[in-house]
């Protein structure tokens, strides 16, 4: 008889222990943020190709909520960051400078890091409407032949400068599992 009471008591303790284990917040769910999801970023750190060095940290803020599975997975205002990996100086034929920002990431609602694709900061990114000296050099080669080509070779591109507050769109580099509420 005592054996059955011990078993019953043990069952009560095990059940109580299982109920006491935290199960996560009510309504919590794991959401997969797919590769290639767009993330809007605002530069918090200005970038200028004439002064920035490889290894410089560049900070961003997410400027709008990112949703997946009907849930917010990255909040507006979330921190994002990257490191300058390469700086190309201006060249001949109007080739402008560019800055590659790699090791990009942002912070999800559960505090995990979400990897983002490298950003290439160039004149095209800053102002897509401007044709620039490279187009003029190519046109000069067609219209004026060798003389136009020589003149185009003398045209140097410019540095690229991105002030804080400039917005860009990056994309997620891999699928990410994020716990949401």
Image (cartoon, helix red, strand yellow):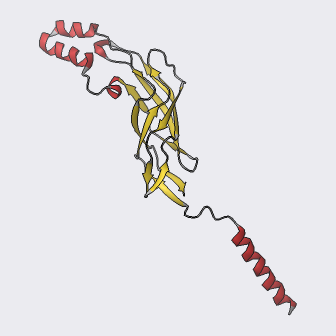
Q: Give the left or right position of residue 170, taking residue 83 as reference.
A: left
Image quarter of residue 13:
bottom right
Farthest residue in the left direction? 143
Q: Give the left or right position of residue 2, taking residue 44 as reference.
A: right
If the image is split into quadrants, where does the N terminus sit? Answer: bottom right
Q: Residue at x 47, y 52 (%)?
A: 72
Q: In the rendering, at what x and y percent does residue 22 appear? A: 67, 64
When the figure is inspected, residue 79 is found, relative to residue 129, above or below; the finding is below
Farthest residue in the bottom direction? 1
When the figure is inspected, residue 110 is found, relative to residue 128, above or below; the finding is below
Image quarter of residue 138:
top left
If the image is split into quadrants, where does the C terminus sit? Answer: bottom right
Q: Give the left or right position of residue 127, taking residue 42 as reference.
A: left
Farthest residue in the right direction? 2
When the figure is inspected, residue 27 is found, relative to residue 145, above or below; the finding is below
The number of numbered discs placed on residues in the rendered structure image is 0
Q: In the rendering, at what x and y percent does residue 108 appear? A: 53, 47
Q: In the rendering, at what x and y percent does residue 86 appear? A: 46, 24
Image quarter of residue 19:
bottom right
Q: Residue at x 48, y 43 (%)?
A: 76
123 vs 71, nearest the viewer = 71
Q: Residue at x 24, y 22 (%)?
A: 131
Q: In the rendering, at what x and y percent does residue 46 appear? A: 47, 24
Q: Give the left or right position of residue 35, taking residue 21 as reference.
A: left
């Amino acid at each position: 008889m005592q054996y059955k009471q011990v078993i019953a008591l043990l069952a009560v303790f095990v059940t109580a222990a299982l109920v006491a284990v935290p199960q996560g917040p009510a309504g919590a769910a794991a959401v997969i943020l797919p590769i290639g999801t767009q993330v809007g970023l605002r530069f918090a750190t200005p970038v200028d190709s004439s002064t920035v060095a490889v290894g410089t940290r560049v900070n961003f803020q997410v400027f709008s909520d990112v949703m997946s599975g009907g849930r917010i997975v990255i909040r507006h205002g979330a921190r994002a960051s990257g490191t300058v990996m390469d700086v190309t100086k201006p060249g001949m034929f109007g080739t402008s400078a560019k800055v590659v920002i790699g090791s990009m990431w942002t912070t999800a609602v559960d505090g995990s890091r979400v990897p983002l694709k490298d950003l290439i900061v160039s004149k095209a990114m800053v102002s897509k409407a401007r044709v620039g000296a490279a187009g003029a050099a190519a046109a000069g080669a067609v219209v004026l032949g060798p003389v136009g080509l020589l003149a185009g070779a003398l045209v140097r591109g410019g540095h690229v400068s991105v002030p804080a507050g400039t917005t860009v769109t990056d994309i997620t580099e891999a699928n990410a599992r994020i716990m949401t509420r």
